[in-house]
Amino acid sequence: MASLPPTVRTTPHRLAERLSHDTEAIWAVLDEALICHLGYDTPAGPLVIPVMHARVNSDLYMHVSTGSQLALEAPAQVCLTATLLDALVLAKSQFHHSLNYRSVIVRGEATVVDDPREIDIALTAIVERVAPGRSQHSRRPNHKELAATQVLRLPIVEASVKQRSGPPKDDEEDLDLPHWAGLLPVVTGMGPAQPTAETAAAGWPAPQSR
Amino acid sequence: MASLPPTVRTTPHRLAERLSHDTEAIWAVLDEALICHLGYDTPAGPLVIPVMHARVNSDLYMHVSTGSQLALEAPAQVCLTATLLDALVLAKSQFHHSLNYRSVIVRGEATVVDDPREIDIALTAIVERVAPGRSQHSRRPNHKELAATQVLRLPIVEASVKQRSGPPKDDEEDLDLPHWAGLLPVVTGMGPAQPTAETAAAGWPAPQSR
């Protein structure tokens, strides 16, 4: 799969070996992350909020409530960052302590989606991220609910993925120090489903998250 | 414990029942989150990066490499957001699908720490967040390493915690719909430690993360 063209905004000054513009790698992180953090400027300074997102081809969609202060004055320049934490990296030296992670940064202009068909595609994609098939096993939004929902689109054009993996990298002269070195993996998964009392009584099987 | 005074920047327009300025609740989320997302404005627009943080009393500390584009032109207005995801909330209606989460937003001015004693306190706190006691079982930074590290301080003054917990809240008229409703808990924990070959051979016990 193709790579996105690096721009000044997506090219770091250092540790470039950790950075990639590979489209497949970028999409993989965006698809695995359950939430992301969306940053934008406000009259009161920078603001970063957690949001749920869904990718449809090369577009990202998010929704916010129209009544919220989080509703953007779109179109707006934003930065969407999705981070997966894989491990704590413990080195002999404090300086080389690190994290194993995969993080995607998408910068660009977020716009409000007006087309009802595109809104439907976006909201369906978001609910499908919760559990595959879920859009068919829940009530679709009505007109009032749609009016209360702002759907934003951010094209995945100016984007990069940065990652670290593998063991700690200590300086040669530190390797004999009598300190534990290695990885403490961070594991994220789903616990047992907790149906409401009514759902439990009905005995329906729980949806499987991804 | 006291609450922080709400400001215009930390008071939302809606869902206020989910919001608190309680200091203890704010500190608890900041202390549990292994990473946070730091947002700030750049000449090329908003930028949000994942960073590791540590709290010392009512200050947050972060460190970035001085050679990185992420090194701030501090002092700078920033927004630090730490989010813990607890569950996917599946309602009868797509509209009431939600997330159970705890998220802290701290807005304010990040400044570069110059005082060597405060830098030492900050870096020690950050390495102690990886694993309690770790600062005593790893090599401390030398002068060259300290010169390559920018330590930032962000006071926890203008801050709020927002959270959702509990089951889905469906509209009365949806309660009889034949759809599964409940929570799919998201569980984050530590997997088995992975020592380097040399550390495994030495047989040292692995540090315990929090």
Image (spheres, coloured by chain):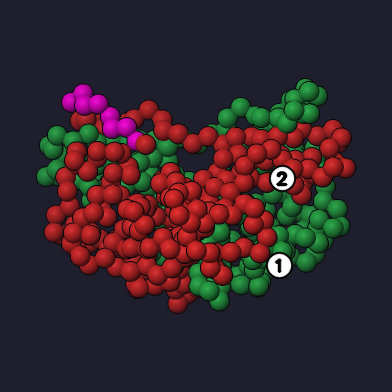
Chain colours: A green, B red
In the displayed structure image, the side of residue A183 where residue B106 appears, left or right: right
Q: Which residue is mark 1?
A: A112
Task: Give percent across and percent down for residue A42.
Answer: 56, 73
Q: Quadrant of the C terminus of chain B?
A: top left
Q: Which residue is mark 2?
A: B97
Q: Which residue is at a point 16% across and 45% down the rendered structure image?
A: B139
- Helix, strand or loop for disc 2: loop
- Helix, strand or loop for disc 1: strand
Range drawn in magenta: B202-209
Task: Give percent across and percent down for residue A117.
Answer: 81, 58
Q: Nearer the viewer, residue B43 or B132?
A: B132
B58 w.r.t. A107: above or below: above
A45 w.r.t. B173: above or below: below
Task: Give percent across and percent down for residue A50.
Answer: 56, 55
In the displayed structure image, the side of residue B149 where residue B157 appears, left or right: right
Classified by dominant secondary structure, the portion drawn in magenta counts as: loop
A127 w.r.t. B51: above or below: above
Q: Which residue is at a point 19% across and 40% down the rendered structure image?
A: B136
Q: Quadrant of residue B132?
A: top left
